[in-house]
Image (cartoon, rainbow, N blue to C red):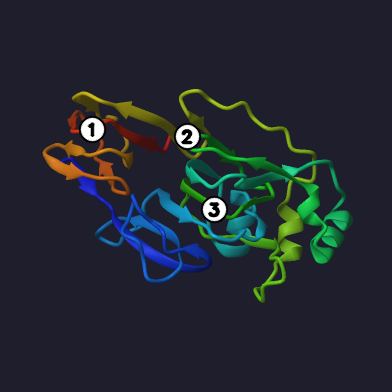
């Protein structure tokens, strides 16, 4: 079979939520992240996850490849977010409102003033945001999203609202983009292209056939709708790896369906 389902792994977080439906069953505890992994346990080139928040995540930043490799023997972390659900006035933060020096960023992180130094955006379902390594960012409360990222878990916290978790100021300041953030334009097709992944949104209400990439695998993530993929039922929250090669994948929706399709360039 050229299509292989990924396996969800549920991670509790202090900022998470028990309300995971319609993507997953509601939980008895606060689940913050659901990682979609290879059923064999081997690492995939990309990490696909769902996030659910009831509190703000820390103000944080991720390193580029060279820094992460030198300090952690790991790839860096560039990511994207596709908003699935957002409570009224729910926000994310991306980048600085104005340029800072390294000393100013450190002082703002230690005092908590960094909250006011960030660009906060109200978000709505269907929006897509690209978060390159080095971009200071935060996800607010009341947001559910699908994240696609490099296969890395290197995160540096700058500020955590007084929660008793470790900060990583020296690393964070060393990798942060200290210039004022310029928001990229929203793509009407939710297309994100970077050196690490290419992602597009696919919405269908009738049968289609997808041609697999002949040289590399791709991944298909169901966001809404029901139907079958090559005869196997799908529902929201499921994801599949599509093998590389000269193959065709049939998607037969029983209702309007939305997917993210992503691959490594």
Q: Is residue 31 above or below residue 255?
A: below
Q: Looking at the image, tell me whether mark 2 or mark 3 is earlier in sequence order.
A: 2
The reply to whether dot 1 and dot 3 touch (C-beta < 8 Å) is no
Q: Dot 1 lies on which element? A: loop
From the viewer's perspective, is 200 left or right of 181?
Answer: left
In the image, 94 versus 66, the foreground residue is 94
Nearer to us: label 2 or label 3:
3
Query: How packed is label 2: few (under 14 Cα within 10 Å), some, or many (20 or more)?
Result: some
Give the distance between the C-alpha atoms of the residues marked 1 and 3, in whole angstroms. 27 Å
Give the distance between the C-alpha atoms of the residues marked 2 and 1, in whole angstroms. 18 Å
Q: Dot 3 lies on which element? A: loop
The residue drawn where x is 75% and y is 64% is: 169
Q: Which mark is residue 171?
A: none
Identify the image quadrant of the C terminus. top left
Q: Dot 2 lies on which element? A: loop
Instruction: Write down the residue under mark 2.
Output: 126
From the viewer's perspective, is 109 left or right of 131?
Answer: right
Q: Residue furthest bottom?
A: 164
Instruction: Write down the residue under mark 1.
Output: 255
Q: Looking at the image, tell me whether mark 1 or mark 3 is earlier in sequence order.
A: 3
Query: How packed is label 3: few (under 14 Cα within 10 Å), some, or many (20 or more)?
Result: many
Instruction: Write down the residue under mark 3.
Output: 142
């Amino acid at each position: 079979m050229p299509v292989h389902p990924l396996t969800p792994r549920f991670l509790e977080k202090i900022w998470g939520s028990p309300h995971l439906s319609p993507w997953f069953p509601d939980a008895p505890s606060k689940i913050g992240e659901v990682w979609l992994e290879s059923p064999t346990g081997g690492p995939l080139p990309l990490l696909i996850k769902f996030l659910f928040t009831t509190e703000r995540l820390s103000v944080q930043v991720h390193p580029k490849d060279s820094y992460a490799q030198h300090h952690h023997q790991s790839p860096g972390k560039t990511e994207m977010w596709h908003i699935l659900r957002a409570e009224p006035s729910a926000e994310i933060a991306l980048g600085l409102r104005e340029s800072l020096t390294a000393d100013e960023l450190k002082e703002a992180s230690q005092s908590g003033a960094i909250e006011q130094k960030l660009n906060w955006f109200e978000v709505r379902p269907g929006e897509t945001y690209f978060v390159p390594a080095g971009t200071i960012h935060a996800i607010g409360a009341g947001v559910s999203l699908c994240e696609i990222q490099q296969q890395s878990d290197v995160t540096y916290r700058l500020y955590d609202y007084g929660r008793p978790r470790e900060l990583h100021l020296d690393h964070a300041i060393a990798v942060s983009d200290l210039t004022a953030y310029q928001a990229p334009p929203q793509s009407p097709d939710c297309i994100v292209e970077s050196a690490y992944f290419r992602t597009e949104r696919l919405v269908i209400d009738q049968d289609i056939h997808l041609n697999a990439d002949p040289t590399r695998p791709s991944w298909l993530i169901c966001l809404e709708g029901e139907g079958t993929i090559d005869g196997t039922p799908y529902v929201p929250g499921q994801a599949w790896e599509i093998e590389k090669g000269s193959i065709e994948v049939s998607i037969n929706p029983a209702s309007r369906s939305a997917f993210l399709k992503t691959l490594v360039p």
